[in-house]
Amino acid sequence: MGKQSRARVLAGHQAMAVARNIRVSPRKLNLVAQQIRGQKVDRALNVLSFSQKRIAGVVKKTLQSAIANAENNHDLDVDDLVVAEASVGKNLVMKRFHARARGNAGGIEKFFSQITIIVEEKREEAPKKDETKAAAPSKNSKGKTTKKTSGKAPAKKPAAKKAKKETA
C-alpha cells in the first residue's frame, strides 16, 4: 500500500521536461528560451544546435528530454510536436564577496536558474478551398448596407465661394 499517484497536471496531448540548478542567470537563459517558443521541435533543435550561447546545449538537452517523454510516456507523434511553452525561473543564489580597498567588501551574486519546456502535439490541417467567398457588404447599426472602401479617405472637393451680400 504505497503512495497514491499524483494527478496529471498537463493535458493529454502535452509532455514536459524540467532542468534545475543551471549555472546561468535567468535573464541569459530567457534569451535562449525566446528563440524556441512556438517553434516546431525539429526547427527548435536546429536553432539550439547552431546557437552561439553557452547555455544552448543544456536547453537542447532539456528539449530532447521533453520530446522523449512525449514519445515514450504519452505516445505522441514526434513530427507534430511544437514547443508550447519554455518558461524560465530563478533558483538558488550563491553569495560571494570580492575584497575591495581599505578593508571593504564588494558583493557578488552567482545566479542559478531552471527551465521548464512543455511540448504539445499540433496537427497542421490544410485550409479548405470552399471558404474563399467574396466579401459581402456589411450592415451598420441602422440596418443599411455600406460600401467597403480601400482605406483611403475620399478626396475633398473645393468649397464653393459664397457671394457676399451687400447691404445698403
Image (cartoon, grey):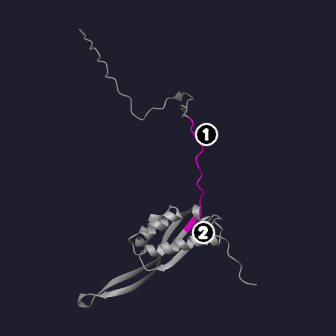
Asked whether residue 132 appears in the rendered view, the answer is: yes
Q: Nearer the viewer, residue 88 or 49?
A: 49
**Amino acid, disc 1:** Asp
- The image shows a total of numbered marks equal to 2
Q: Farthest residue toward the bottom?
A: 103
Q: Nearer the viewer, residue 16 or 91?
A: 16
Q: Quadrant of the C terminus?
A: top left
The residue depicted at 26 percent of the width and 87 percent of the height is 100
Residue 52, quarter of the rendered image: bottom left
Dot 2 or dot 1, earlier in sequence: 2
Q: Find residue 75 and report its horizontal and vertical position in percent.
A: 66, 68
Which residue matches tag 1? Answer: 130
Rendered view: 77 above or below 1: above
Specify whether residue 40 is painted magenta.
no
Name the mark on residue 112: none
Q: Find residue 101 and report its horizontal and vertical position in percent.
A: 23, 88
Whether pointer 2 and pointer 1 mark residues with C-beta atoms closer than 8 Å, the reply is no
Q: Which residues are magenta?
A: 118-133
**Amino acid, disc 2:** Ala
Q: Farthest residue toward the top?
A: 168
The residue depicted at 68 percent of the width and 72 percent of the height is 7
Question: Callout 1 environment at 10 Å: few (<14), some (14 to 19), or many (20+)?
Answer: few
Q: Find residue 122 and report its horizontal and vertical position in percent.
A: 59, 59
Gap between marks 2 and 1 measured at Cα? 35 Å
| Relative to 146, 69 lies left or right | right
Rendered view: 127 above or below 30: above
Specify whether residue 119 is painted magenta.
yes
Which residue matches tag 2? Answer: 15
The residue depicted at 52 percent of the width and 62 percent of the height is 40
The residue depicted at 58 percent of the width and 62 percent of the height is 79
